[in-house]
Image (cartoon, rainbow, N blue to C red):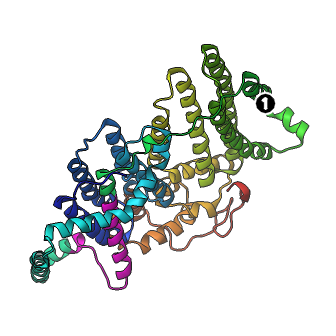
């Protein structure tokens, strides 16, 4: 591992600002405050990289911009689960921006380099502080006294001005976070996480681990028969399965259901998880086959492309069949978070297969980064389309068509679903929105920087059309107490 250049003063100040902002802003939740905290952290990383002589490259800018875009998701959506996924993916994108990986080891092992810097980063900063003090503590004292005096002046005059003018007091109360002694340990932890995390990122930018230099040992190439025969047998099996799927698609499901004795929903559920597993195993088979495939001669390379290309094409049909099975299941039982998540996963796996096919034609040099970009873009799109709103939309449409509605599940959705659930007629509307409205009412004191656009829009709608305080039971359909019809728990 390379030794980093000495830390700059600007990096230290930016890391301190990140820690303080984390302590003040992140304790109330995640929204636009994530972007506010990310600004000084990004500045610290940039200054450290420039001090080490590194210039931002095109792909580093792609990863960095993608990571910042992912941090926008919590400020737009109220649902915590896509926001958590977006934040985790943003951290992975940040590690790629710091390391600039091009190979599979660099893409997969990038976060490891950042984790190791959690120890070396603070030590690097402390060494920089000692060098600036020159071993003389008298140089550190004036800086600390200056900070203490500045904080004292701001506190005293801020209190005086707030007491002198009510409008200024309201403005100050909206801008300054309310930090109580009860959550002091949590705030201190956020301070340390922001400070240490920023120093780790800056340390990585100054001296990143060169994962691109990691050499993966080449596997011994197998003979044509030993390599190709199992795959040809697998292709024949895939082709037979896909032929049956096409026959069922064009011949209708009635005959198949009558012959198997399964219901429409049972037939859909029976196949989806197996097909998802088959897609994952197909990708594993392709990876292993590429390591064993002989490619010394032109005829060998042609055979590899033909066999694996055929397998990939048939795997795409399996992906389409799996998505169709889940669509059938949703028609019977409604849409849930698990179902929309696994469908999104299946679609992304299909995209990965397409990228592998493209790499077989134009070369695999960009394949690791292309797969990483597809994952980043998929998580970003998943967050912005508002999964909870899509779930509510699909289930409301199903209720309007069939009269069946999983009321219990609708109540557990986030504020993102309020615009769709607001379309229901009373008393079903108030039944569905009652718990969401109560949760929003409990969080009404959440600061603006920790409030998402989805929550603000839900409060606006519920403010214009409040939920009825006393909800009478619907004349027909599910009641406010229990849903009329319960989805199968295995795929909930």
**Mark 1 element type:** helix
Whether residue 413 is visible here, answered yes or no, is yes
Where residue 471 appears, x then y in whole percent? 57, 70
Is residue 455 positioned above or below 308 on the image?
below
Identify the main secondary structure in magenta: helix
- Count neighbours of disc 1 (C-alpha within 10 A) and say few if under 14, some if 14 to 19, many if 20 or more: some
Queried whether the magenta region covers residue 177, the answer comes back as yes
**Residue at the spot x=26%, y=70% of the render?**
20
Of residues 330 and 91, which is closer to you in this image?
91
| Residue 148 falls left or right of residue 189 | left
Residue where numbered disc 1 is placed: 241
- Res. 18 image quadrant: bottom left
| Residue 392 falls left or right of residue 405 | left
Where residue 295 appears, x then y in whole percent? 61, 22
Where residue 255 appears, x then y in whole percent? 86, 32
- Res. 156 image quadrant: bottom left
Q: Which residue sits furthest top?
A: 299
- Res. 189 image quadrant: bottom left
Where residue 258 appears, x then y in whole percent? 89, 37
Q: Which residues are magenta?
A: 173-200
Position of the C terminus, as image quadrant, is: bottom right
Whether residue 485 is visible here, answered yes or no, is no
């Amino acid at each position: 591992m390379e030794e980093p250049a000495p830390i700059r003063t600007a990096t230290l100040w930016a890391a301190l600002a990140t820690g303080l902002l984390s302590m003040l802003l992140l304790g109330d939740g995640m929204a636009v405050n994530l972007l506010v905290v990310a600004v000084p952290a990004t500045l610290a990383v940039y200054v450290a990289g420039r001090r080490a002589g590194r210039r931002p490259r095109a792909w580093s800018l792609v990863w960095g911009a993608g990571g910042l875009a992912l941090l926008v998701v919590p400020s737009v959506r109220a649902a915590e689960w896509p926001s958590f996924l977006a934040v985790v993916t943003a951290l992975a994108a940040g590690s790629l921006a710091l390391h600039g990986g091009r190979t599979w080891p660099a893409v997969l092992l990038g976060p490891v380099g950042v984790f190791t810097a959690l120890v070396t980063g603070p030590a690097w900063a402390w060494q920089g502080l000692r060098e600036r003090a020159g071993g003389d503590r008298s140089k550190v004292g004036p800086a600390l006294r200056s900070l203490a005096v500045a904080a004292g002046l701001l506190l005293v005059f801020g209190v005086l001005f707030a007491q002198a003018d009510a409008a200024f007091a309201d403005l100050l109360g909206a801008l300054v976070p309310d930090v109580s002694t009860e959550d002091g340990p949590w705030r201190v932890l956020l301070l340390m996480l922001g400070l240490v995390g920023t120093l780790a990122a800056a340390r990585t930018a100054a001296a990143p681990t060169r994962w691109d230099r990691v050499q993966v040992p080449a596997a011994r190439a197998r003979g044509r028969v030993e390599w190709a025969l199992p795959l040809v047998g697998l292709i024949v099996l895939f082709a037979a399965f896909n032929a049956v799927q096409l026959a069922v698609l064009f011949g209708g499901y009635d005959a198949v259901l009558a012959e198997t004795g399964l219901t429409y929903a049972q037939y859909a559920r029976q196949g989806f998880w197996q097909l998802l597993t088959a897609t994952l195993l197909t990708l594993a088979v392709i990876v292993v086959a590429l390591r064993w495939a002989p490619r010394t001669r032109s005829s060998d390379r042609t055979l590899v492309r033909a066999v694996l290309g055929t397998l990939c094409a048939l795997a795409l049909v399996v992906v389409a069949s799996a998505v169709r099975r889940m669509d059938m299941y949703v028609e019977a039982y409604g849409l849930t978070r698990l179902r929309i998540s696994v469908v999104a996963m299946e679609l992304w796996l299909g995209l990965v297969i397409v990228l592998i096919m493209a790499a077989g034609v134009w070369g695999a040099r960009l394949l690791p980064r292309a797969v990483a970009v597809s994952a980043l873009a998929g998580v970003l799109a998943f967050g912005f389309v508002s999964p909870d709103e899509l779930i509510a939309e699909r289930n409301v449409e199903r209720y309007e068509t069939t009269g069946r509605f999983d009321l219990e599940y609708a109540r557990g959705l986030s504020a993102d679903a309020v615009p769709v659930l607001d379309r229901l007629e009373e008393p079903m509307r108030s039944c569905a929105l009652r718990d969401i409205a109560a949760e929003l009412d409990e969080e009404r004191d959440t600061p603006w920087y920790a409030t998402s656009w989805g929550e603000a829009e839900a409060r606006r709608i519920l403010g214009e059309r409040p939920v009825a305080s006393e909800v009478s039971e619907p004349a027909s359909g599910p009641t406010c107490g229990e849903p009329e019809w319960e989805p199968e728990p295995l795929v909930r």
